[in-house]
Amino acid sequence: MNNELSLYVHIPFCVRKCLYCDFLSFGDKESLMEDYFKALSKELKEGAGDYRDREVKTVFFGGGTPSLPKAEYICDILSDIKENYRLSENAEISLELNPGTASFDKMRSYKDAGFNRLSIGIQSFNDEELKKLGRIHDSATALRTYEDARRAGFDNINIDIMSALPGQSVESYLNTLSRAVKLSPEHISAYSLIIEEGTPFFDMDLDLPNEEADRDMYHKTAEMLLEHGYHRYEISNYAKDGFECRHNKVYWKRGDYLGVGLGAASLIDNVRFNNTRDLKEYLTSSDIIKRDTEELSVKAQMEEFMFLGLRLTEGIRTADFKREFGKTVFDVYDEVIDKYLLMTFLELCDEDMNITDDKEKTAYLKLSEQGLDVCNTIMADFLF
Amino acid sequence: MSHLDQSKIRNFCIVAHIDHGKSTLADRIIEETGTLTEREMQEQVLDNMDIERERGITIKSQAVRMIYKAKDGEEYTFNMIDTPGHVDFGYEVSRSLAACDGAILVVDATQGVEAQTLANVYMALDHDLDVFPVINKIDLPSAQPQEVKDEIEDVIGIEAQDAPLISAKNGIGIEDVLEAVVNKIPAPTGDAGKPLTALIFDSIYDSYRGVIVFVRVRDGVLKKGMKVRFMATGAESEVVEVGYFGPGRFIPNDELSAGDVGYFTASIKNIQDTRVGDTVTDSTSPCAEALPGYKKVMPMVYCGLYPADSAHYSDLRDALEKLQLNDASLFYEPETSQALGFGFRAGFLGLLHLEVIQERLEREYDLNLVTTAPGVVYKVHKNDGTVFDLTNPSNLPDPTEIDYMEEPMVNGEIMVTTDYVGAIMQLCQERRGKYISTDYIEQTRAILKYELPLNEIIYDFFDALKSRSRGYASFDYELKGYERSELVKLDILINREEVDALSFIVHKDGAYERGRKMCEKLKEEIPRHLFEVPIQAAVGGKIIARETVKAYRKDVLAKCYGGDITRKKKLLEKQKEGKKKMRQIGNVEVPQAAFLSVLKLDSTD
């Protein structure tokens, strides 16, 4: 039985939906907000009983745009968490924030309430690109938001930026990246845009950078950020030492997390489930609506362990696999591992992260740098 | 009950060039005779295979019995047998014709006589059928009925001035056709008192009733409960059910007598016992000799058929066995390929026949197939003086053992409007055609005669012909015989591994061109891998062309957080599934379509 827990709180409101976004969010439904936060508070309180013995190590408010509603709504929810759960002393408590929705005063309120990490969705410092994405802010606003956050006392800040945007050149992207670096945030998430089905972008005729340019952007990101003291720890995530996002690592290492709010996903004791995605139902139902409950078979757990763990640059810890499943990763996946070792897409590392070819000495199994670029094919091979 | 009065029976078929409206006319005749009410009437009821309806062509012969009350006050029984229009199915046509006494020739009032019109009419005349023409599509603005009548008389030499002018689509003139059937098609002339003599013109397999045999009774009577003998095989069976053909269903009856067309079942388990073309007779008092039957047809095109999943080998074998039952022109024997495993080498009358069989196997038998490039039968003369037929390129001996090779040639006739004569001559030139002659049948149309190697026309010749003449050319051919030719085997290497299933025989002058195109086409078909995949064409171990499928550089999901995991896993599963549908050649995954798509290489692309 796991005695740790992470909490994810979903805030499904946005000024408007960005053209590439496939997260669950609604436009500006101010009228619904009050009801929503009531329901959220209720869900948190009612659910707490099941997790009384667990220590909550991380909390993440994501969206949507958590910085859109009045700060008191958000801060009250955090109070609910503190009152009803065993929140760890040094818990990482993050909030997603979008430029153009959060004033300095709001940020002060977050800080006072106990939030200790902000994730700012800047995406680009090029106004043209921002417009094409359907974002509501421009680069000047983004800059001001960042400075306000610092003034409000946040000393752990992430900046989201995006590559492979429509009409984006490698130069323009590198310009955004270097401006982000200049701000010296503790953490940078650098994503390549994914065109998801069901988003407006999916049906649009976009002038997207070709694959070469896309990879060029990704590789230069790693280079430039390393020069400035950021290490890559996941496919799209970079941090200064000691500032890796603890909450997100729970997802990749398959720690237990409870999602609260509309459509939020949970993994508790190897059972995955989701809240309803129907806003009306969420607001009116007297019970917490858990959906799609899936008890993961041992095979499914192994599959997840591999394809999630391999997202991390350190890869999977062979000792963790052994502890979890009672056999070594080589017992289960020897053939696949050998195939990709031979193609140099996988690497074995010893306890000190030095590459080895001795399976006995292996402490980590990880994707090589080339392997990270084409990891889907490799991960798919770890499915049974 | 007395037997049906033969003078009131009319057994006929409809022949036409493709698209001239044969099946539509058949529908109208069924409708007009009240055999089906309008509610029951579906578009083209006789084309009851999915493929037939989708492609608008008739592949299998279909028969239907109707009752028509004629203007003379008498009731007539019509047995109408629908026949395929495509040259590849000439064999089917010939089988159906043998069950008929006459034929309606449908000619499009806007197109006139075409190559297939001639081919089918000659076949009908060969079977001693009385043929009368009808002019269809007279309601179209470009219809020229008088010109077409004249043309029929000039080109075919049959009386056409009183041909019914009709529109099958809009139901104009259908009664005139029915009257013409009564008056112009002769009644059968068998003798119900003689011993049973019935010709098998088709058969199908039904999982409940066993083989259902389609017969035309020449003499005698076929009754439920009687014991019959299949003269070619000597097999005997007791007749369980006798009946005639309702539209789309079988209608049991007590008997079939001389002149009648219908079916019977006899709990026949061994489907090899009933051969199309064989004669059925009464076991207790057999007829003196069998009916002439049919000319044996030789497959002209061969290809490999493999189950995509090797576990389905026996399913494929069963399916081929059943298809052969009602398609005697289909030939197959087991073979093995290094790339594709266990499968069959199958022989067909032409490429359309091949495609149809392939589609039927996939649809009717739910099989997932890999088909290899079709080839013709070559004659290989070895240095030791022996000669053998080569149907699979992989079996070609080492060049040092070969004295020379021969390939099959055809006499081709292309009917084309004069505007496109140049384009078509160019095409024939490219296909190694030897020019014979040009005959102008009227001012705007000509018949081009060429001698062509069969292997040049089995791939995409029809498509090329259509596209270069904007659909105005039609083509007919007959096998001429074998000629000596400079042939080589072209091998394809994927990631440096020779793929036997992609090898084929080609004229040495065309090897470079075809090799290059094959590589280009395969480059399009083979998905990118984690590594570079070279695709090479080689003749006698020498590389003559190369393309490279570049390794992909990006295949990554940038984001994957708590709420995404289930969905992202599904994406990975989908990716894995996609790979399963491909053929593994070495460590390269090749989509099944790649094995056939390399056929479509016309140079105007």
Image (spheres, coloured by chain):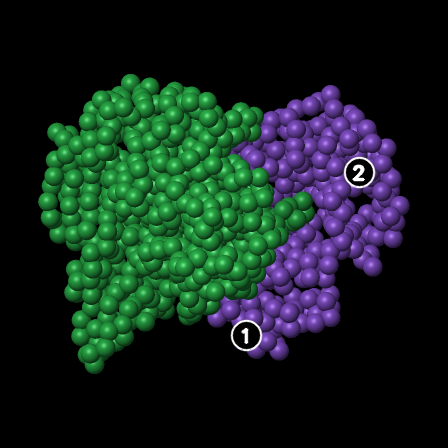
Chain colours: A purple, B green
Q: CA distance from mark 2 to mark 1?
A: 49 Å
Tell which of A201 and A215 is nearer to you: A201
* As drawn, A253 above or below B85: below
**Which residue is at 36% across, 40% downward?**
B101
Q: Chain of mark 1?
A: A
Tell which of A358 and B349 is nearer to you: B349
Circle 1: residue type: Thr
Residue B178 visible in the current orientation: yes
In the image, farthest residue toward the front: B193
Mark 2 or mark 1, earlier in chain: 2
Q: Chain of mark 2?
A: A
* As drawn, B296 above or below B338: above
Give the crowd class for mark 2: few <14, some 14-19, many >=20 residues within 10 Å.
Answer: some
* As drawn, A263 above or below B402: above
**Which residue is at 49% across, 30% downward?**
B67
Q: Position of residue B114 (x, y in %)?
A: 24, 36
Q: Position of residue A108 (x, y in %)?
A: 71, 33
Q: For the C terminus of chain B, give its image quadrant.
A: top left
Taking the image as shown, residue B541 lies to the left or right of residue A66, namely left
Please tell me if label 2 and label 1 are on a single chain. Answer: yes
**Which residue is at 54% across, 76% downward?**
A357
**Which residue is at 27% across, 46% downward?**
B126
Q: Position of residue B240 (x, y in %)?
A: 60, 52
Circle 2: residue type: Ile
Residue hosting label 1: A356
SS class, disc 1 = strand
Residue A224 visible in the current orientation: no
Residue hosting label 2: A289
SS class, disc 2 = loop
Taking the image as shown, residue B122 lies to the left or right of residue A358, namely left
Q: Position of residue B21 (x, y in %)?
A: 36, 31
Q: Quadrant of residue A320?
A: bottom right
